[in-house]
Amino acid sequence: MKTPFILIALAAVAHAEPVVILSHTVGSGGGRVTSANVSIVSEIGTLGGVVAESPSNVVVARQGFAGRLYDEAAFSIGGGAQFLAENGTLQATALVITDDNLFAPVPGSAVTWLFTNATGQAIVDAAGLITGQPVYETAALNLRGEYHGLSADVGVSVLDTLADNFGLYAGDTVPDAWQVLHFGTGDPFGVGGADPDGDGRTNAFEFLALTGPHDPASAFRFEITGLALPGVTVRLSSMEPGRNYVIQSAPAPGGPWTDGDTLTSETPQSNVTHGFNAPAGMNGFFRLEIRRP
Protein backbone atom coordinates (compact mmCIF):
# COMPACT_ATOMS: atom_id res chain seq x y z
CA MET A 1 0.00 0.00 0.00
CA LYS A 2 1.41 3.41 -0.95
CA THR A 3 1.38 6.10 1.78
CA PRO A 4 1.98 9.87 1.39
CA PHE A 5 5.54 10.17 2.61
CA ILE A 6 5.49 13.86 3.48
CA LEU A 7 3.11 13.52 6.46
CA ILE A 8 5.75 11.55 8.39
CA ALA A 9 8.32 14.29 7.88
CA LEU A 10 6.01 17.06 8.95
CA ALA A 11 6.07 15.96 12.62
CA ALA A 12 9.85 16.25 12.65
CA VAL A 13 9.96 19.86 11.35
CA ALA A 14 8.73 22.55 13.71
CA HIS A 15 9.10 26.28 12.97
CA ALA A 16 7.66 29.44 14.39
CA GLU A 17 7.83 31.09 10.98
CA PRO A 18 5.74 30.18 7.94
CA VAL A 19 7.16 27.09 6.29
CA VAL A 20 7.00 25.92 2.72
CA ILE A 21 7.72 22.24 2.10
CA LEU A 22 8.25 21.20 -1.50
CA SER A 23 8.42 17.61 -2.66
CA HIS A 24 9.88 16.58 -5.98
CA THR A 25 9.14 13.03 -7.04
CA VAL A 26 7.80 10.89 -9.79
CA GLY A 27 4.43 9.42 -8.86
CA SER A 28 0.82 9.00 -9.76
CA GLY A 29 -0.97 11.34 -7.42
CA GLY A 30 -0.69 14.00 -4.77
CA GLY A 31 -2.20 17.21 -3.55
CA ARG A 32 -1.75 20.56 -1.87
CA VAL A 33 -2.50 21.48 1.73
CA THR A 34 -2.28 25.03 3.05
CA SER A 35 -2.81 26.81 6.35
CA ALA A 36 -1.70 30.07 7.90
CA ASN A 37 1.80 28.70 8.57
CA VAL A 38 2.30 25.74 6.26
CA SER A 39 2.07 25.06 2.57
CA ILE A 40 2.59 21.45 1.45
CA VAL A 41 2.79 20.15 -2.10
CA SER A 42 2.98 16.34 -2.08
CA GLU A 43 3.09 13.38 -4.43
CA ILE A 44 2.71 9.65 -3.82
CA GLY A 45 5.56 7.75 -5.39
CA THR A 46 9.32 7.32 -5.27
CA LEU A 47 11.13 9.93 -3.21
CA GLY A 48 13.50 12.05 -5.22
CA GLY A 49 14.17 14.74 -2.61
CA VAL A 50 12.37 16.95 -0.12
CA VAL A 51 13.38 20.44 0.91
CA ALA A 52 11.93 22.29 3.91
CA GLU A 53 12.74 25.98 4.06
CA SER A 54 12.26 28.79 6.53
CA PRO A 55 14.31 31.87 7.33
CA SER A 56 16.22 29.90 9.98
CA ASN A 57 17.04 26.47 8.49
CA VAL A 58 17.08 24.20 5.49
CA VAL A 59 16.54 20.43 5.83
CA VAL A 60 17.02 17.91 3.03
CA ALA A 61 15.32 14.53 3.46
CA ARG A 62 17.69 11.58 3.07
CA GLN A 63 17.45 9.78 -0.22
CA GLY A 64 15.80 6.36 0.11
CA PHE A 65 14.00 7.09 3.41
CA ALA A 66 10.63 8.56 2.56
CA GLY A 67 9.69 11.46 4.78
CA ARG A 68 12.41 10.69 7.33
CA LEU A 69 14.27 13.66 8.78
CA TYR A 70 16.28 11.81 11.45
CA ASP A 71 19.45 9.76 11.48
CA GLU A 72 20.33 6.41 13.10
CA ALA A 73 22.57 7.19 16.05
CA ALA A 74 22.99 3.79 17.72
CA PHE A 75 22.08 0.14 17.37
CA SER A 76 21.34 -2.44 20.06
CA ILE A 77 20.67 -6.18 20.07
CA GLY A 78 19.20 -8.43 22.73
CA GLY A 79 18.33 -7.25 26.20
CA GLY A 80 21.45 -8.20 28.11
CA ALA A 81 23.14 -11.59 28.28
CA GLN A 82 21.19 -14.35 26.53
CA PHE A 83 20.96 -18.02 27.51
CA LEU A 84 19.71 -21.09 25.68
CA ALA A 85 19.98 -24.85 26.13
CA GLU A 86 21.96 -26.98 23.73
CA ASN A 87 19.65 -28.00 20.87
CA GLY A 88 17.35 -25.12 21.93
CA THR A 89 16.51 -21.96 19.97
CA LEU A 90 16.45 -18.26 20.77
CA GLN A 91 15.35 -15.34 18.59
CA ALA A 92 17.76 -12.41 18.62
CA THR A 93 16.10 -8.98 18.61
CA ALA A 94 17.40 -5.60 17.50
CA LEU A 95 16.61 -1.91 18.03
CA VAL A 96 17.83 1.23 16.31
CA ILE A 97 18.11 4.45 18.31
CA THR A 98 17.71 7.70 16.39
CA ASP A 99 19.41 11.04 16.93
CA ASP A 100 16.13 12.39 18.33
CA ASN A 101 16.00 9.59 20.95
CA LEU A 102 13.40 7.42 19.30
CA PHE A 103 13.58 3.62 19.51
CA ALA A 104 12.45 1.46 16.62
CA PRO A 105 12.57 -2.35 16.26
CA VAL A 106 14.62 -3.68 13.37
CA PRO A 107 13.48 -6.87 11.61
CA GLY A 108 15.92 -9.71 12.19
CA SER A 109 16.18 -10.29 8.46
CA ALA A 110 17.51 -6.73 7.98
CA VAL A 111 20.51 -7.40 10.25
CA THR A 112 23.71 -9.24 9.39
CA TRP A 113 24.30 -11.76 12.21
CA LEU A 114 27.50 -13.58 13.13
CA PHE A 115 29.28 -15.13 16.10
CA THR A 116 32.71 -13.61 16.52
CA ASN A 117 34.10 -16.51 18.59
CA ALA A 118 31.94 -19.53 17.72
CA THR A 119 33.54 -22.87 16.94
CA GLY A 120 30.37 -24.90 16.40
CA GLN A 121 28.58 -24.32 19.72
CA ALA A 122 25.71 -22.42 18.05
CA ILE A 123 24.50 -21.25 14.66
CA VAL A 124 22.47 -18.17 13.73
CA ASP A 125 20.38 -17.88 10.58
CA ALA A 126 19.74 -14.84 8.39
CA ALA A 127 16.69 -13.83 10.48
CA GLY A 128 18.57 -13.94 13.80
CA LEU A 129 17.29 -17.32 15.05
CA ILE A 130 19.99 -18.89 17.22
CA THR A 131 20.17 -22.69 17.55
CA GLY A 132 22.36 -24.18 20.27
CA GLN A 133 24.53 -27.14 19.32
CA PRO A 134 25.65 -30.01 21.63
CA VAL A 135 28.37 -28.82 24.01
CA TYR A 136 30.45 -30.59 26.66
CA GLU A 137 30.43 -27.53 28.95
CA THR A 138 28.63 -24.20 28.95
CA ALA A 139 29.90 -22.19 25.98
CA ALA A 140 30.16 -18.38 26.23
CA LEU A 141 29.76 -16.81 22.78
CA ASN A 142 29.64 -13.28 21.41
CA LEU A 143 26.84 -12.49 18.95
CA ARG A 144 27.30 -9.47 16.70
CA GLY A 145 24.66 -7.69 14.66
CA GLU A 146 25.50 -5.25 11.86
CA TYR A 147 22.96 -2.79 10.45
CA HIS A 148 23.50 0.22 8.16
CA GLY A 149 27.12 0.66 9.21
CA LEU A 150 26.33 0.26 12.91
CA SER A 151 27.11 -2.80 15.01
CA ALA A 152 26.39 -4.15 18.47
CA ASP A 153 27.39 -7.20 20.50
CA VAL A 154 25.69 -9.34 23.14
CA GLY A 155 26.81 -12.38 25.11
CA VAL A 156 25.08 -15.68 24.39
CA SER A 157 25.63 -18.73 26.61
CA VAL A 158 24.82 -22.23 25.36
CA LEU A 159 24.11 -24.30 28.50
CA ASP A 160 25.33 -27.88 28.85
CA THR A 161 21.97 -29.41 29.76
CA LEU A 162 22.71 -32.93 28.47
CA ALA A 163 25.83 -34.57 29.87
CA ASP A 164 26.29 -37.30 27.26
CA ASN A 165 25.50 -35.97 23.78
CA PHE A 166 28.70 -34.45 22.42
CA GLY A 167 30.11 -35.64 19.11
CA LEU A 168 31.89 -39.00 19.11
CA TYR A 169 31.33 -39.36 22.87
CA ALA A 170 27.53 -39.14 22.73
CA GLY A 171 25.44 -41.86 24.33
CA ASP A 172 28.25 -43.97 25.85
CA THR A 173 27.22 -43.44 29.55
CA VAL A 174 30.31 -41.30 30.27
CA PRO A 175 29.91 -37.52 30.77
CA ASP A 176 31.37 -35.66 27.81
CA ALA A 177 33.24 -33.20 30.05
CA TRP A 178 35.29 -36.04 31.63
CA GLN A 179 36.16 -37.45 28.20
CA VAL A 180 37.22 -34.07 26.80
CA LEU A 181 39.28 -33.43 29.94
CA HIS A 182 41.26 -36.67 29.46
CA PHE A 183 41.19 -37.13 25.67
CA GLY A 184 40.27 -33.82 24.03
CA THR A 185 37.48 -33.71 21.47
CA GLY A 186 36.81 -36.57 19.07
CA ASP A 187 39.48 -39.11 20.16
CA PRO A 188 38.39 -42.73 19.44
CA PHE A 189 40.38 -43.85 22.52
CA GLY A 190 38.10 -41.65 24.62
CA VAL A 191 34.81 -43.48 24.01
CA GLY A 192 33.22 -45.27 26.93
CA GLY A 193 34.05 -48.80 25.80
CA ALA A 194 37.74 -48.16 25.07
CA ASP A 195 40.63 -49.22 27.34
CA PRO A 196 43.53 -46.97 26.29
CA ASP A 197 45.87 -47.98 29.13
CA GLY A 198 45.24 -51.72 28.75
CA ASP A 199 44.43 -52.35 32.43
CA GLY A 200 41.26 -54.28 31.70
CA ARG A 201 39.01 -51.40 32.82
CA THR A 202 37.03 -49.45 30.24
CA ASN A 203 36.81 -45.69 30.27
CA ALA A 204 33.24 -46.02 31.57
CA PHE A 205 34.56 -47.91 34.62
CA GLU A 206 37.55 -45.59 35.03
CA PHE A 207 35.12 -42.67 35.23
CA LEU A 208 33.01 -44.38 37.90
CA ALA A 209 36.09 -45.37 39.92
CA LEU A 210 37.73 -41.96 39.31
CA THR A 211 40.97 -43.62 38.26
CA GLY A 212 43.33 -42.47 35.52
CA PRO A 213 42.39 -43.78 32.07
CA HIS A 214 46.00 -43.39 30.85
CA ASP A 215 47.68 -45.06 33.85
CA PRO A 216 47.40 -48.85 34.27
CA ALA A 217 48.85 -48.56 37.80
CA SER A 218 45.78 -46.59 38.94
CA ALA A 219 43.35 -49.48 38.28
CA PHE A 220 40.67 -50.00 40.93
CA ARG A 221 40.70 -53.36 42.77
CA PHE A 222 38.21 -55.12 45.02
CA GLU A 223 39.29 -58.20 47.00
CA ILE A 224 37.86 -60.58 49.59
CA THR A 225 40.60 -60.74 52.22
CA GLY A 226 38.76 -62.75 54.87
CA LEU A 227 35.93 -65.27 54.63
CA ALA A 228 34.60 -67.21 57.62
CA LEU A 229 30.89 -67.18 56.99
CA PRO A 230 28.91 -65.36 58.01
CA GLY A 231 31.86 -63.01 58.54
CA VAL A 232 33.41 -61.43 55.43
CA THR A 233 36.24 -58.90 55.08
CA VAL A 234 36.84 -57.02 51.84
CA ARG A 235 39.41 -54.50 50.65
CA LEU A 236 38.89 -51.60 48.25
CA SER A 237 42.04 -50.20 46.62
CA SER A 238 40.58 -46.69 46.74
CA MET A 239 37.50 -44.68 47.64
CA GLU A 240 36.63 -41.22 46.32
CA PRO A 241 34.10 -38.56 47.38
CA GLY A 242 30.96 -38.46 45.27
CA ARG A 243 30.71 -42.22 44.83
CA ASN A 244 28.74 -44.98 46.57
CA TYR A 245 30.50 -48.34 46.89
CA VAL A 246 27.80 -51.01 47.18
CA ILE A 247 28.77 -54.53 48.28
CA GLN A 248 26.48 -57.12 46.71
CA SER A 249 26.01 -60.82 47.44
CA ALA A 250 24.47 -63.74 45.56
CA PRO A 251 23.86 -67.49 46.03
CA ALA A 252 25.60 -68.23 42.72
CA PRO A 253 28.12 -66.50 40.45
CA GLY A 254 25.36 -65.53 38.03
CA GLY A 255 23.18 -63.93 40.72
CA PRO A 256 20.62 -62.70 41.47
CA TRP A 257 22.63 -60.04 43.28
CA THR A 258 21.37 -58.33 46.42
CA ASP A 259 22.62 -54.98 47.72
CA GLY A 260 24.35 -55.08 51.07
CA ASP A 261 26.52 -52.48 52.82
CA THR A 262 27.11 -49.17 51.06
CA LEU A 263 30.38 -47.38 51.75
CA THR A 264 31.08 -43.67 51.17
CA SER A 265 33.92 -41.29 51.97
CA GLU A 266 34.18 -37.51 52.21
CA THR A 267 37.91 -37.59 51.38
CA PRO A 268 40.01 -39.74 49.04
CA GLN A 269 41.18 -42.97 50.70
CA SER A 270 43.27 -45.97 49.66
CA ASN A 271 43.39 -49.61 50.80
CA VAL A 272 40.10 -49.48 52.69
CA THR A 273 39.07 -52.67 54.53
CA HIS A 274 35.51 -53.41 55.61
CA GLY A 275 34.04 -56.32 57.56
CA PHE A 276 30.41 -57.45 57.56
CA ASN A 277 28.19 -60.49 58.04
CA ALA A 278 26.89 -62.17 54.90
CA PRO A 279 23.11 -62.45 54.51
CA ALA A 280 21.60 -65.80 55.52
CA GLY A 281 21.73 -68.39 52.75
CA MET A 282 24.60 -66.80 50.85
CA ASN A 283 27.40 -69.17 49.84
CA GLY A 284 30.09 -66.54 49.66
CA PHE A 285 29.70 -64.88 46.26
CA PHE A 286 30.31 -61.17 46.50
CA ARG A 287 31.04 -58.27 44.22
CA LEU A 288 31.26 -54.46 44.36
CA GLU A 289 29.23 -51.97 42.33
CA ILE A 290 30.30 -48.32 42.16
CA ARG A 291 27.47 -45.83 41.71
CA ARG A 292 27.08 -42.09 41.42
CA PRO A 293 24.68 -40.71 44.07
Image: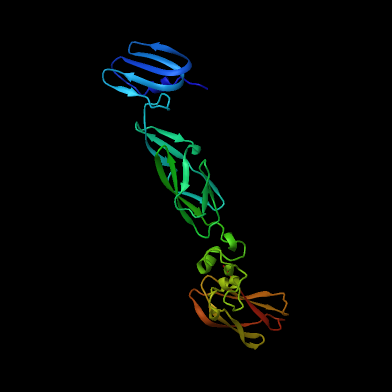
Residue 168 locus on image (x, y percent): 59, 62
Residue 223 locus on image (x, y percent): 61, 84
Q: Is residue 38 left or right of residue 26?
A: left
Q: Is residue 175 above or below residue 254?
A: above
Rendering quarter of residue 293: bottom right
Specify the farthest residue to the left. 56
Q: Is residue 23 above or below residue 263?
A: above
Residue 190 visible in the current orientation: yes
Residue 199 locus on image (x, y percent): 59, 79
As rendered, which of 228 and 222 lies closer to the eye? 222
As rendered, which of 237 and 129 lies closer to the eye? 129
Q: Is residue 5 above or below residue 251?
A: above
Residue occupying the point 49% across, 43% down: 92
Rendering quarter of residue 100: top left
Q: How many marks?
A: 0
The color scheme shown is rainbow
Residue 130 locus on image (x, y percent): 52, 46
Residue 290 visible in the current orientation: no
